[in-house]
Image (tube, rainbow, N blue to C red):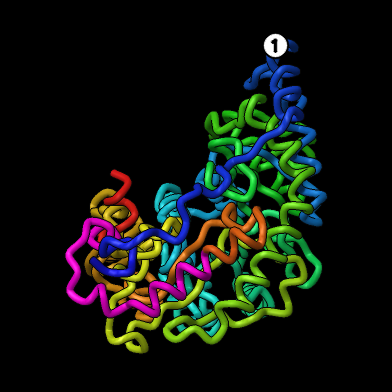
Amino acid sequence: MGKLAITGGEAIRKKRFDPWPVFTETERAALEDVLTNRNWGGQPFPGKHTEAFGKKFAEYHTAKYGQTVNTGTVAIQAALKAIDIRPGDEVLVPAYTWEGTVGPVLLVNAVPIFVDVDPESYCMDAKQIESLLTPKTRAILPVHLGMRFADLDAIMAIAKKHNLKVIEDCAHVHGGMWRDKGAGSTGDLGAFSFQSSKLMTSGEGGAVITNNLEYFERVQSYINAGRRSVTDKYKKRLIGFNYRLGEFQAAILGPQLERLPEQGKVRQANMDYFESRIRGIQGIGLLKPEPRITRPAPYGYVLKYFAEQVKGIPRAAFVGALQLEGIPCDGLFYEPVYCSSLFPLDPNDFPALSWGRPKPLDLRNMYKCPESERAAYHEAVWFSHHLFLGSKADVDSIVNAMCKVMENIEEMRGLEHPAVKAQGQSRADRES
């Protein structure tokens, strides 16, 4: 019997962390209001709660217009339609992200072009963008991942130089700011998710924000079955679908937006404390600080694990051991999309991959993004944001568990344990 819980010892933490999501009586009252007023969603459009929340959410992110939608993936798809992405157009996307960033590009019959990530932030590496541009490139879709922003200064400069549009995937940065501008308001549009793990959640849901009225009108029309927008200044008509968010979901988002600033302060204080304690632990590295992020909004804390510094013990063993010490965390959280089992791409299903080419693009096999692959399969360790909404004692338990695992890392050499094996599976396979 070893000292680690994974080898038979006693776990550091036996108490579960406070659950996520959280709610108060304010949410109950909002739901009761929807229930009794009998306007539960759909028509008339927009609903009382969806309209009010869209306006407040946009304002909080320094944008003029905000529209709720039914998922974050649809938010990206609607944004692509707003900037008039056409079949065959190319859109640059990061390789290391959730598959839902890339799927909408294909669903509008455009072509995703994968860009490797910057190892200092795990976000799209702006230095690689210009080498991947072609006459068909129309847009850049950076993802603000985990606890960092993509380099919007560099990306916007490239977009201006080459007359490209920028859609920010902001699913991880509700309330965040880059140079005092809200997430999603620097680019042409910002797309947010309210899926259950996010900093704000309605179970499922999303939003699009923009400072461009024409884009806003196109988003409204697209997600409301093609009907004209509320303002209809530009009188754009397009085939749309029912991608509206219901009133029950919008109602519980309002109180969460009110709580977001205070929650952000608690998370950041605890993450700062966490970082001060883990700095210098052998085998652990930190992402590079980014002073241009003037209001942090970390979806989670992401650190680096260096197996070569700890006798070659793989990340899967480290993460599995932490989990059995009572600390929820993940290693293979995202994969390079082109490697993912949730990206079973057959070029024959997407005609744009063949147009004007001697043979169809094989997106699953034509890319090699070494930094994305290193992060996904060897290096990145993710801790959910809700672990940092508690006390310093909660943070201490995480750090103490990490120290315990590192001090006894040799116990895991060659260990065949279900927790370790599970960390060798993709997130999609584990959750299937």
- Residue 134 lies left or right of residue 27; in this view the side is left
- Residue 407 lies left or right of residue 269; in this view the side is left
In the rendered view, tell whether residue 298 sits above or below residue 309: above
- Residue 115 lies left or right of residue 44; in this view the side is left
Q: Position of residue 386 (x, y in %)?
A: 59, 52
Q: Residue at x 50, y 47 (%)?
A: 16
Give whichever of 334, 361 is nearer the camera: 334
Task: Give the residues drawn in magenta, as a range.
Answer: 398-423
SS under mark 1: loop
Give whichever of 224, 254 is nearer the camera: 254
Q: Quadrant of residue 180?
A: bottom right
- Residue 38 lies left or right of residue 198; in this view the side is right
Residue 121 visible to the viewer:
yes
Principal secondary structure, stretch drawn in magenta: helix
Q: Quadrant of residue 114?
A: bottom left
Q: Quadrant of residue 247?
A: top right
Q: Position of residue 370 (x, y in %)?
A: 35, 81
Q: Residue at x 66, y 19 (%)?
A: 43
In the rendered view, tell whether residue 341 sits above or below residue 414: above
What residue would you read off at disc 1?
A: 38
Q: Position of residue 263 (x, y in %)?
A: 72, 52
Neighbor class of circle 1 (other Cα within 10 Å; few <14, some 14-19, many 20+) is few
Residue 188 visible to the viewer:
no
Name the quadrant of the N terminus.
bottom left
In the rendered view, tell whether residue 120 sits above or below residue 177: below
Circle count:
1
Q: Residue at x 67, y 79 (%)?
A: 290
